[in-house]
Amino acid sequence: MFKIFFKCILGIFFSYSLQAQSVLQKGILDLRTWDFDQKPILKIEGESHFEYNKFLEYADIQALKKPHFIKIPSNWKDFSSDDMPLKGQGFATYSFQILLPKKRPENLVFHIPEQSVAYKLYINGKKSLEIGKLDSTAEKNQMQVLPIILELPTADTLQIVFHAAQFSLREGGLRAAILLGEAQEIRRDREKKILFDVFLTGATFIMSCYHFGLFFLRKKDKSSLIFAIICLLTLLRTLVTGEQVLAQLFVEWSWHFDLLKMVAYLTFYGLLMALTSFVQSVFPEDISQKVLRFIQIISVICMLATVFLPIQISNQIIPFYQIFALLVVIYYLVMIGIIVFRKRPDSKIILLGILIICIATINDILYFKLILDKTILLFGIGLFIFLFLQAFLLASRFSAAFGQIENLSGELRNLNQNLEQKVESRTQEINQKNNELNMTIEELHSTLDIVSSQKREIELQQDNLLLAKQQIQEKTQNLLSSIQYAKRIQSSMLADKALMKSFFSDYFILYRPKDVVSGDFYWFKQIDEHRGIVTVSDCTGHGVPGALMSMLGIEILNKIVDDKNIHEPAQILTALHQNIRRTLRQEQTDNTEGMEMGILLLDKQSRQIVYAGAMNPMYYVENQEIIDVRTAKKSIGGHLTNEKKDFEQQSIQLSNNPVMLYLCSDGYQDQFGGQNKRKFMIKKLKSLFVELANLPLKSQKTRLENTLIHWMKEANEKQTDDVTVMGIRF
């Protein structure tokens, strides 16, 4: 136990020593010369931009003519804005800029301890984190107790903005130092601290159980009971302070800010009362009972105030009680010194424990007051050392008592030894062996019963597994049947091939969905005897989601062309984009689904074609030369608003020579395969179009499909996306 304890202590101090400092100056932390290999963790300290009772963005703060600066970590109650002291409760904006070196780890993170405020963190204008529910009013603001490790974006400059608010405590602000560093080192540092808290929790729990047991065995000795209570209070305080082990294990508890703070306050009051009671129980003749009663009355009053008064009022007691606790510790330190002078047994161990508690208490009070910022919280460590010393003291007392009892028993046995006792002793040994043998037989019977019971349970579990397997198979078959039915529905909505055959003299369609249903679709509409519209579209995703989008796109296209009589490709794309965004409510939701499309208007009489594309180009081959007709790189639906979506179309007058027109989705060109497991690429696809242009359309389709299959087999790759290629000889 000694080795584990001191390893944890050394680990915590070592990890603290790794936390180098780099100072913020006027809201800028310049780390461009920082070496993260040598100093992987640093504390962010210095001057941050600060605006009280305002939630501002980074650009707004930079535009201020008279910006304010505040030291972090600190509380804003100690800050004066325009010579006016601020209240502890309210809300504010912190802002600073971090300039990172070119050579740095890829996975930098923030370690943000529990700050006792609700806050939102914005990095480079984007919200990256929200702890609690931030609001500028006390009624809606809700704080959360949760330390966090946040991964940072990969940028050379980080613009950091904290919006923070608290209306419960006497002081507010970013009061705990934020660490910046390499993810593995930060997590290792945090794990060491959590390991110590867990070790302290486990050790105090074991001590508590042990001394409760001692008390129930010997109820006359109250010191064991009081010591067990001290261990329990230490356990509770460890769970709700420091690394907030309780909130990290049960995240839902992190929202009970008032309750967790109440537990922290109550354990603080209770520990002082229990520690003084313990010292009085060990030295009842030297410690005044009246002083102890006074301490207990003050502590109970503070505990009742904490339980029954709002936290906004009860937390105002803390600074006064800290001073009171410091005076009490000093008083007891003096009294233990007097007891040592009187040479009371075990008084030196008590004095050492009280001295450690006193040093730790002073350190933590100055730390919370932000007077000392180059140290760590020592109360938990000091309290554990105190508990360990007192546990050793109690154990030595019990050991001495048991030793005395053993000596007396040995003397009694020596005085009463005779032949009759030896015979009786042998008889008892034989009876004991018989009893042990009988117990062994009973245990064997019990073991056989357990094995039989486990066998029945295993057989029952096997039956349940078989039943579950049958149910899964039935559900899988139903699901496959539903998808096959969906395929028939989708196929019925695609362009009528007989109608296309009557309009085009010669064409082909290579249509290979990745799954049963497809996110690609092709569509055709004949306007009159000489004109027709044809399109190939690639919807977001594939499988069932893509199929839903394709059916939505087909239905909207029918309405645009049939009901609204819109025949110009660019106007069709614009109307389709507006309808998709309206149907999917993309202005109100985070839905970003859309589609890429190429749409072609053909006039057989004038041999003129008009093309407009949303991400998808069109290719045509004439006289062994391929021309790709490209348009703006914009998709249908998605992020862009209606005002930014301008689609263009191109009119092309074809000669009387036969021309091959090709429309396709990106599935063919993006397919992985070949000997090097690379994409097919558009350059190779265009060369293939030129090579196939003079072949019959049926042969072109066969060659395209066989080429794709061979490309995938060479690399043992499966189809990665829906594939659609349409060829028209015009």
Image (cartoon, rainbow, N blue to C red):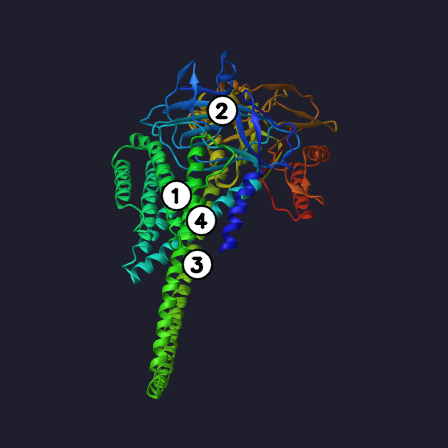
Q: Earlier in the sequence, mark 2 or mark 1?
A: 2
Q: Earlier in the sequence, mark 1 or mark 4?
A: 1
> Which residue position is annotated with label 3?
469
Q: CA distance from mark 4 to mark 3?
A: 57 Å
**Residue type marked 1:** Leu
Q: Position of residue 181 (x, y in %)?
A: 57, 36
Horizontal side of residue 418 vs 149, given as left or right: left
Q: Earlier in the sequence, mark 4 or mark 2?
A: 2
The reply to whether residue 424 is in sight is yes
Q: Secondary structure at mark 2?
A: strand
Q: Position of residue 549 (x, y in %)?
A: 48, 34
Horizontal side of residue 602 vs 222, given as left or right: right
> Which residue position is annotated with label 4?
385
Give the vertical position of 568 relative to 706 (above or below). Answer: above
Q: Secondary structure at mark 1?
A: helix
**Residue type marked 4:** Ile
Quadrant in which the C terminus appears: top right
Give the number of the disc on residue 333: 1
**Residue type marked 3:** Lys
Q: CA distance from mark 1 to mark 4?
A: 16 Å
Please tell me how crowded label 1 is: few (under 14), some (14-19), or many (20+) other residues with Cα within 10 Å.
many
Q: CA distance from mark 4 to mark 2?
A: 34 Å
**Residue type marked 2:** Lys
The residue positioned farthest toward the right in the image shown: 624
Q: Position of residue 248 (x, y in %)?
A: 43, 43
Residue at 30%, 63% (x, y): give it: 217
Residue at 42%, 18% (x, y): give it: 80
